[in-house]
Image: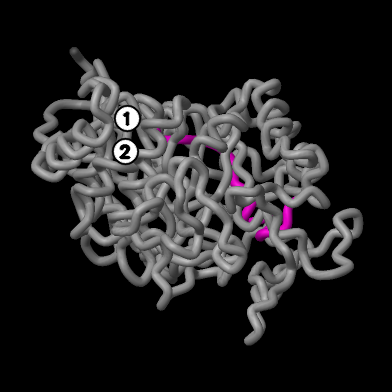
Amino acid sequence: MAGRHTIAPLILLLSLLLTLGCRSVQATDDWRSWASTPPMGWNSYDAYHGAITENQFKACVDILADKYLASGYEYAVVDFCWFNPGPENWDPDNWTSFPVDQKWNEDGSYSPTMAMDEYGRFLPAPNRFPSAADGRGFKPIADYVHSKGMKFGIHIIRGIPRQAVAEKMPIKGTEQTADQVIHYKESAWTNNTHIVDISKPGAQEYYDSIFGLYAEWGVDFVKADNTMKSFYRAGEIEMMHRAILKCGRPIVLSQSWGEAPLSFADHLDSTSNMWRISGDFWDRWDQVDHMFDLCSRWVPYIGNGTWPDADMLPVGNLRVGGFPGLDDEHLTKLSDVEIKTMMTLWCIARSPLMWGGDPVTTPAEYEKYLRNSEVIAVNQQSENNREIFNRRQKRVWIADVPDSKDKYIALFNLHDDERRDVTFQYFWSKLTGAYHVRDLWRREDIGTFETKFTQTLESHASGLYRLSPATD
């Protein structure tokens, strides 16, 4: 694709060939085909924070399979701290969210005790995920998700468990122990893991061991957290990439959280299927507004099995039960037009579509934002997506319809308090003549227009259209 650089991917490819020996060039490129279109699915974080239980997750999967899978939402992802049993006396049957950090005392003691195996690898907490008992891990839940025709994903925090370091647990297949592969001066973001020192023996083997375990469970998607915040963890990202290529199972790799640095764009493009271009995104208009700038910066890296990720869609019921220190349970604070504007941007910029609302308690009225097949087609099937106009809080994006002379056009009015006319001038994209216009949100044809196409949009509103030549 125009704008992509090739040196960094070639360097990484040579490195992989030297590391993996007999693996072919084609084998190292197969990972791009695992996300040939922007991944679509649901992630538990926006609704359940770090405390979802097996029963809650399965209830969400049932609804996703029944209502959303046919629209393309195929991934169901357990987000962070699934290994945490919760504070003392926490009751999964009387559910509340909880802080996710371990408490560490000066004498080296800690609480709570996280679930893990003899090789220092996190396991699902059995009080929250009963089917994980006796070493079964997430395999029973992955089997359940697969039985519904869907794919299963998990969140991980880069690094090695701090608890495994304290206990000097062995790294599978090596003579090293967990305390021998860490950077002693740093702990990771959640206080549950230590940063891996990529220069030390056993570091790659630790990542090989956890992704090997995930492959045994049947994991299809891994969201790797804390790989880009504060500074970019290039070495650990490469270790994850190599571990996936070795594990024997296609696993889509997502990097989080951003804003991803553009200076490492080529590196991300050569190691990961998707990466966050923003910090945590919530139901606030100022964050939607800022996302326009972020999406336009990442246009050269859209496609070829790699996708700049604008984060989850906070649509419907969020923060079930209230999140400690964050916010109470509520329906999305974005208005109707703001939800459509968010969805329109995600689709025309081809961001992954990962829904964050609670499938169980979200009112049915919100489905219309997520399940419009003509809108989703823009996300899944368009090409050559780009912003072509940005002036005075008006934005215009365009994309090609594959194997067609048709175009997708998105118009945006980002003004806070005024209705505005937003115009697409045909000459901007060397279009001539008349074009029939179909409104994709309304699913209806709205007329034929020559030389330009203009719509009056209220504040924070948008429109998404398909333009077809009136004469061929």
Residue 208, image x and y in percent? 44, 41
In the rendered image of this protein, does residue 367 appear above or below residue 467?
A: below
Q: Is 459 part of what is drawn in magenta? A: no
Residue, x 56% and y 27% (percent of image)? 71
- Judging depth in this view, the residue of 135 and 45 nearest the camera is 135
- Residue placed most toward the observer, 19 or 298: 19
Most extreme residue toward the top, as rendered?
472
**Which amino acid lies under the numbered mark 2 shown in the image of this protein?**
Thr
Whether tag 2 and tag 1 are in contact, CB under 8 A, the answer is yes
* Crowding at mark 1 (Cα within 10 Å: few <14, some 14-19, many 20+): many
Q: CA distance from mark 2 to mark 1?
A: 7 Å
Q: Secondary structure at mark 2?
A: loop
Q: Nearer the viewer, mark 2 or mark 1?
A: 1
Residue 306 numbered tag: 2
Quadrant location of the C terminus in the rendered image: top left
Considering only order in the chain, which callout, 1 or 2, is on the residue closer to the N terminus? Answer: 1
Density class for disc 2 (Cα within 10 Å; few <14, some 14-19, many ≥20) is many
Which segment is the magenta one? 38-52
Residue 292 falls left or right of residue 282: left
Q: Nearer the viewer, residue 411 or 210?
A: 210
Quadrant of the snapshot with the N terminus: top left
In the image, what residue occupies the spot 56% across and 37% down? 213
Residue at the outermost front position: 175
Residue at figure coordinates x 66%, y 84% from the top left: 107
Q: Is residue 83 left or right of residue 283?
A: right
Q: Position of residue 163 (x, y in %)?
A: 61, 65
Which type of secondary structure does the marked residue at label 1 adopt? helix
